[in-house]
Image (spheres, helix red, strand yellow):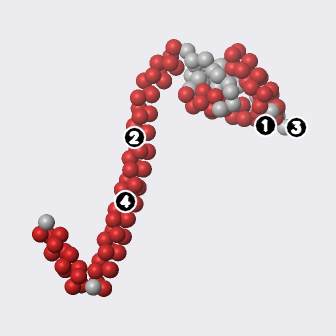
Amino acid sequence: MLLKPEDFIPSKSSTADIWMSWYKALKSDLGEDDANVLFKSVWDARGSDDANTPELRDFLAKYGITVKMGAKEAILDAISSPFEFFNFAKDIGKTMIYGWMVFIFLIMAVVIYFLFNASKNPGETIGIATKIAMV
């Protein structure tokens, strides 16, 4: 006999991961609407501050469930949110590095193109280079 999600309801000591796994099982067994109603009622009765993590709230928000934050969670979120900037900055830094690499590659390609064309007619190239150097 297979266990249904209703047979293993999380308790007050359950972690956020257990609550998320239980919601996934509910959703696959009952459908999203019924899973949302059942989850919300069970959370209101058995949810704990320890399980009420930003990850759980973000996960549930994707499915239209809002879990109330207590004072403890609000303070922890406020403290941790400035550090999210560093993750954002790290991602921007990676993007900028890749952008510079592409830019340098394009500059090198242009230089190689001009050197290739200059090798075809060296006399004209020397004349142009001399005029540019005199400026």
**Please, what is the three-letter code of the amino acid marked with disc 1?**
Ser
How far apart marks 3 and 1 lie (CA) works out to 18 Å
**Please, what is the three-letter code of the amino acid marked with disc 2?**
Ala
Q: Residue 95, how many percent across, how many down? A: 42, 50
Q: Secondary structure at mark 3?
A: loop
* Residue at image mark 3: 1
* Residue at image mark 2: 89
| Disc 3 to disc 4: CB gap under 8 Å | no
Answer few, some or many: residues within 10 Å of disc 1's Cα (few below 14, many 20 plus, some between 14 and 19). few
Res. 48 image quadrant: top right
Q: Nearer the viewer, residue 8 or 51?
A: 51
Quadrant of the snapshot with the N terminus: top right
Q: Nearer the viewer, residue 2 or 69?
A: 69
* Residue at image mark 4: 103
How far apart marks 4 and 1 lie (CA) works out to 48 Å
Of badges 4 and 2, the one in the foreground is: 4
